[in-house]
Image: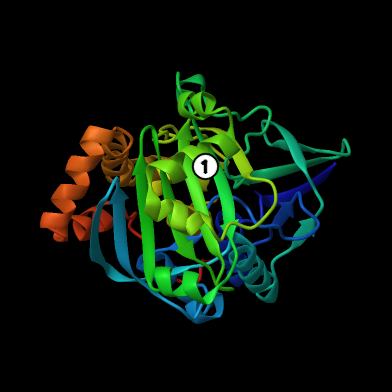
Amino acid sequence: MRRTPALIIGGGPAGAATAILLARGRAPHLLIERTAATGDALCGGFLSWRSLESLAALGIDPAALNPAMLTIARLFVGGTVAEAPLPQPARGVSRHRLDSVMMAQAISQGAAVERGADARAIDGDTVRLHDGSEIAADAIFLATGKRDLRGLSRPPEAQQADPSLGLRVRLSPAPALSKLLAGTIELHLFDRGYVGLNLQEDGSGNLCLAVHRSRLNEAGGPEGLLRALAAESPALAERLAWRQPGAIDAVANVPYGWRQRVGIAGLFRLGDQAGVIPSLAGEGMGIAIASGIRAAQAFAQGGPTASVGFQHRLARDLVRPLGVAGLIRAAAEHPAAARQLVALAKKAPIMIEIAARLTRINHSPIDAPRAA
């Protein structure tokens, strides 16, 4: 059995942020990532101004992710449209690009990385891999996104009677699409769900849906749902005209609103393993990056047992963004309330800016952590 002082499970934004800072501080560690090559995860695609500031502090130039900026938020419900400026410019970026750049930065800082190492289960301080081998660690940083590991699955209360699912389709780059979406992140609200859409670094559109299983079942599946939504919304139908051929990506039973409240010595839960914000807030990547930074700093200053205080502070700081996003989501998924929400935003665009600010998590200043 191998042993390492710090084991990071997952090479996405949370795990890579942790690795960058541990490598900078010369803290012995190992990051394992189950994929041999970087894919394009379903979740993500939007980086707020605060996330971009943190990435810059990690040594990543935001312009290297996407030179184009997002400055406008636009809401649709039925035939009503409201828009307002974002508090500060944001950027749209594919998960493939973000994950690749962050992993490259971690490796350039000296991070120890093993790819193709698929963690399957955790028992105390020991992680079992797909090939039956085991790695023991003084501190484990759980950065597996929405994927649970045996032994550390999120609790039953994270599950819901009518759970939400995430779906994604890609829109092909085209001058007309670029003109339609330039500088804008869009939210299209519908019965029991919503669509988020913005351009990525290659000019393609990242169209993600969060939808309750009951609505998906009524539509007869993802294709039926897209047809129904196109019939309900001419604006969405116009955008779906650029849909790329191919399968619809999906992730099941997303526990929006859940957060880990209790810490365990030696275990740092990061990103979606610490708290899951409704995707309409556009802060999932922000929470992942912020949690990775905070965890690395806590470990550098207090060692494995610092995880208890870290988890408590993170849970506390997630109350406001998850709570506000949950209230907006509850209104957005009910047609009558959604119409009132967009009508209010149309009359007072400042409400969009306020909501954007309230759904951000505070990002910590980054100082190179000292080795634990």
Nearer to me, 252 or 52: 252
The residue furthest left is: 347
Q: Position of residue 286 (x, y in %)?
A: 43, 57
Tag 1: amino acid: Leu
Of the 4 image quadrants, the one containing the N terminus is top right
Which residue position is annotated with label 1? 226
Residue beneath the point at 74% across and 63% down: 112
The answer to whether residue 203 is visible is yes
| Crowd tier of the residue under label 1, counting other residues whose Cα lies within 10 Å: few below 14, some 14–19, many 20 or above | some
129 vs 103, left or right, is: right
Task: Please state if 130 lies on the left or on the right of 270 as rendered.
Answer: right
Percent coordinates x, y for residue 301 in the rendering: 48, 58
Residue at x 64% of width, y 63% of height: 96
Q: Could you tell me which secondary element the residue under label 1 belongs to?
A: helix
Q: Quadrant of the C terminus?
A: bottom right
Classify 210 as above or below 287. above
The image shows residue 315 at horizontal and vertical percentages of: 37, 40
Q: Is residue 137 left or right of residue 307?
A: right
Point out residue 309 in the picture as x, y percentages from the top left corner. Answer: 41, 43
